[in-house]
Amino acid sequence: MSWSGGKDSALALYHCLNNKEINITGLITTVNASNNRISMHGVSVDLLRQQVWSIGLPIHIIPLPYPCSIEEYEEIMNKFLSLQMQQGVEGIIFGDIFLEDIRKYREHQLSKLGLKAIFPLWGRPSTEIVQQFFALGFKSIVTCIDGSLLPKNFVGKDYTSDFTNHLPENVDICGENGEFHSFVTDGPIFRTPLKVKTNRFIRKELPNPLGGKLKTYWYADLISRSQIE
């Protein structure tokens, strides 16, 4: 499973773990090799390892150079996935909800290798996904926001109904368009909850995927509470 550590990944994993036709062999996470953090989400590898230990599945951490071209990314992933196929892997699970271009890209890339792309949450309304996420007892923290769409005070907050109620109308409540990213700390897929705290807030100017001037992103640098107690 393609694993970001965020809420949509967690809910998709929950559904797959309860599907007898799916046997998950491990999680895949790409990280920025220059800072050892989950790509875009900004969460440290140390916290990622704590998270997946609590979930109880193997993790494959794939370092990506920064910056990383699409050609470099595809070469790295194709090598990794080819090795996994030799171990019997037949498909990759994604937590995508409605972005057609992303789905088509994933399906195209995997089909070239003979792999299936699986989308457990696909086509479901964002409101339905959020309601189920909360009803199941999942908990998460917002680790990154697009500063052009949300003010700084949204980063580092718990992802709750209060958080979603205060989002601007042009922001998807699942953050499916990249408006924000999260890190899940508890829920029905966890053996024990993670205890984390925001250490500091970080501002970064990153390239705009659509071109033009740089975009501002705000990150919450999360650390384990055991590091400060």
Image (spheres, rainbow, N blue to C red):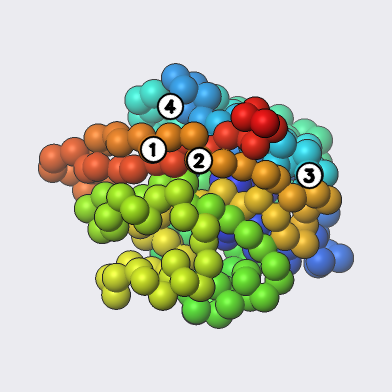
Distance of mark 4 from mark 2, alpha carbons? 33 Å
**Which amino acid does the dot numbered 3 rest on?**
Ser
Q: Are marks 2 and 1 in contact (CB under 8 Å)?
A: yes
Residue pointed to by mark 1: 201
Query: Of the residues under marks 3 and 4, which one precedes in the sequence?
Result: 3
Residue 87 sits above or below residue 143 on the image: above
Q: How many residues crowd around disc 2 within 10 Å: few (fewer than 14), some, or many (20 or more)? A: some
Residue 34 sits above or below residue 13 on the image: above
Which residue: 51% across, 46% down? 109
Which residue: 78% across, 39% down? 53
Distance of mark 3 from mark 4, alpha carbons? 32 Å
Q: Based on the displayed image, in which of its 4 quarters is residue 220 positioned?
A: top left
Query: Of the residues under marks 2 and 3, which one precedes in the sequence?
Result: 3
- The quarter of the image holding the C terminus is top right
**Which amino acid does the dot numbered 4 rest on?**
Glu
Measured as percent of width and height from the top left, residue 136 is found at 71, 71
**Which amino acid does the dot numbered 2 rest on?**
Thr
Distance of mark 1 from mark 3, alpha carbons? 26 Å
Q: Is residue 1 among the parts visible in the rendering?
A: yes
Out of 219 and 26, give the one closest to the viewer.
Answer: 219
Label 4 vs label 1, nearer the camera: 1
Residue pointed to by mark 2: 198
Residue pointed to by mark 3: 54
Which residue: 18% across, 43% down? 211
SS class of the residue under badge 2? strand
**Which amino acid does the dot numbered 1 rest on?**
Phe
Residue pointed to by mark 4: 72
SS class of the residue under badge 1? strand
